[in-house]
């Protein structure tokens, strides 16, 4: 009855969706006969439900099964059947989708002329339906198939796709520009079979399209797209007698394009733009006369005056920057380098703290005391830890240093190699480059860790919860860094003729 018609259609559509999902899963497993049966069931169910878009998708799945079975005539017949079905229903949008299926099948079966004809018909129908997504798909089919039939027309198709893709998405535009660059490179390589010098116009167009594609891939964080684009740039430069190391040294197609246009890579073996002709200078413009050297009295100037600072360590009890927030709850992961004499008791102290609950993630990296014997590897451990935390999108990281405290920079006596200043330099740079990270630092000499480690353990949590993000303990007392103004002394007061340079050095 009419009252039950909507429910019946919904049930049939649900059955069709289940059969289509099964067909795709069985196709992935290589069970082609069962996948074909499910695809036919889905086609029939969607036809009864009146769901033409899903019916077209089910036919596409059936075509995929035939292509996997190497049954190319059956695949083309199914695609043409879809065209006839939607043409009889006077549905331009669905008919355009069916024509795209025909074009894709013909392309995969290397019938490029038939693919071009189906692509043009799909483009006409997509324009009639006002569907820009299908228009883009039709231009892409015409471009891919046209590269095997008429490369000049294929390049025109890529150009039209680039114009249309601007209205769709950045990723679509990047893919279209990459295809255009690749088509120009193909035409350039074919021309080299009859000419020893690479075509200038195709070279410029390859670099221009690759430059824009790389910019969009970078905007979309598509690393593979950036790599493929750089490979195109390396190939076109190689065709022009430019070594591929140029690409490895720059890794920026925009810089390479600017260098090419400025004549940096022009040589007798290519037709790249030459360097701009320089105007010869006149002698009077280069060599000044005696009047130009006449100057009045001048005073010595120090360009860095007022911009010189030094770091001093102040007792935390005198600063008044304590942690006024309630203690958070953290799920901690401990890392260490070197031997673990102090790392184990510190880890036990952190685990037994009230803040050690499975809540917010926090990483604690403990450096080793024998870093003097493994200085470079200790430095790389810190750098790789920061990079791993940033990549994993974690938010909180604390570095812990054992057996070190700050030193008086005016003390010139010999001392052991220290690590904390390198660690502080790396993590301060990381705060600038990855501002979403909250990075703390807690260090202390041996007396502080052995006598009473509890304040140092509490400071591990305080450094990520307060503005006092760097604390070093010396003889059990906490210190924090502060920038103070320290003007430099004037190294030269006056210049007198006849004096050697050593007279003015201090």
Image (spheres, rainbow, N blue to C red):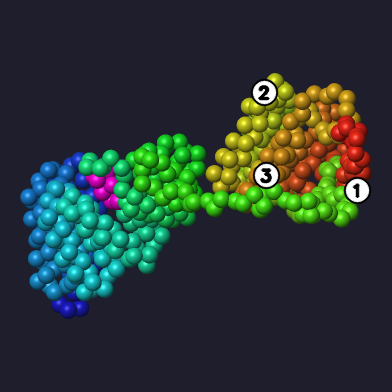
Give the number of the disc on residue 429. 3
* Residue at 83 percent of width and 47 percent of height: 309
Residue 189 lies, in percent from the top left, at 27, 43
Q: State the quadrant of the N terminus.
A: bottom left
Disc 3, SS: helix
The stretch of residues the image draws in magenta is 181-191
Residue 301 lies, with reference to residue 344, above or below; the image says below
Viewer-proximal residue among 451 and 156: 156
Estimate how packed mark 3 is, as few (under 14), some (14 to 19) or many (20 or more) residues with alpha carbons within 10 Å. few
Judged from this view, the residue extending furthest toward the bottom is 2
Decide whether residue 488 is among the magenta residues. no
At 22% from the left edge and 69% from the top edge, which residue is drawn? 126
Q: Is residue 385 left or right of residue 36?
A: right
Nearest the viewer among 197 and 497 is 497
Lower sequence index among marks 3 and 1: 1
Are circles 3 and 1 on residues that touch, CB within 8 Å? no
Q: CA distance from mark 1 to mark 2?
A: 36 Å
Observer able to see residue 130: yes
| Residue 169 x/y as whole percent | 39, 62
The one of 389 and 344 positioned closer to us in this rendering? 389
Looking at the image, residue 180 sits to the left or right of residue 5; the answer is: right
**Could you classify mark 1 by the number of other residues whose Cα lies within 10 Å: few (under 14), some (14-19), or many (20 or more)?**
few
Give the label on residue 374, or none. 2
Residue at 82%, 30% (x, y): give it: 445
């Amino acid at each position: 009855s009419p009252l039950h018609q909507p429910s019946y259609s919904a049930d049939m559509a649900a059955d069709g969706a289940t059969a289509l999902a099964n067909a795709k899963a069985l196709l992935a497993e290589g069970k082609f006969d069962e996948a074909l049966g499910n695809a036919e069931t889905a086609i029939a169910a969607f036809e009864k439900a009146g769901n033409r878009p899903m019916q077209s998708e089910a036919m596409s799945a059936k075509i995929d099964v035939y292509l996997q079975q190497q049954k190319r005539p059956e695949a083309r017949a199914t695609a043409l059947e879809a065209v006839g079905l939607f043409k009889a229903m006077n549905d331009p949008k669905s008919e355009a989708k069916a024509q795209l299926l025909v074009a894709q099948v013909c392309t995969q079966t290397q019938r490029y002329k038939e693919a071009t004809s189906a692509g043009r018909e799909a483009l006409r129908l997509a324009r009639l339906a006002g569907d820009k997504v299908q228009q883009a798909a039709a231009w892409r089919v015409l471009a891919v198939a046209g590269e095997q039939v008429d490369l000049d027309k294929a390049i025109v198709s890529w150009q039209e796709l680039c114009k249309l893709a601007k209205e769709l998405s950045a990723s679509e535009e990047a893919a279209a520009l990459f295809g255009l660059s690749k088509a120009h490179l193909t035409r350039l390589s074919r021309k080299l079979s009859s000419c020893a010098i690479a075509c200038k116009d195709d070279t410029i167009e390859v670099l221009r399209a690759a430059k824009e594609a790389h910019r969009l891939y970078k905007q979309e964080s598509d690393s593979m797209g950036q790599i493929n684009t750089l490979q195109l740039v390396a190939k076109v430069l190689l065709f022009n007698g430019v070594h591929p190391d140029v690409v490895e040294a720059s890794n920026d197609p925009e810089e390479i394009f600017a260098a090419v246009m400025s004549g940096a890579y022009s040589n007798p073996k290519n037709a790249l733009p030459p360097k701009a002709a320089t105007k010869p200078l006149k002698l009077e413009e280069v060599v000044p006369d005696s009047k130009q050297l006449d100057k009045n009295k001048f005073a010595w100037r120090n360009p860095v005056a007022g911009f010189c600072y030094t770091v001093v360590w102040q007792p935390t009890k005198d600063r008044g920057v304590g942690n006024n927030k309630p203690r958070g709850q953290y799920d901690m992961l401990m890392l260490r380098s070197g031997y673990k004499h102090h790392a184990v008791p510190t880890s036990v102290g952190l685990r037994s703290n009230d803040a050690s609950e499975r809540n917010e993630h926090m990483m604690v990296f403990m450096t080793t005391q024998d870093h003097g014997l493994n200085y470079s590897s200790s430095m790389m451990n810190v750098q790789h830890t920061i990079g791993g935390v940033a990549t994993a999108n974690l938010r909180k990281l604390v570095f812990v240093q054992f057996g070190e405290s700050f030193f008086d920079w005016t003390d010139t006596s010999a001392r052991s190699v220290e690590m904390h200043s390198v660690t502080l330099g790396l993590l301060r740079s990381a705060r600038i480059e990855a501002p979403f990270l909250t990075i703390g630092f807690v260090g202390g000499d041996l007396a502080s860790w052995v006598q009473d480690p509890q304040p140092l353990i509490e400071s591990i949590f305080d450094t990520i919860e307060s503005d006092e993000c760097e604390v070093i303990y010396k003889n059990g007392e906490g210190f924090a860094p502060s920038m103070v103004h320290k003007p430099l002394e004037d190294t030269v007061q006056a210049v007198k003729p006849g004096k050697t340079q050593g007279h003015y050095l201090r």
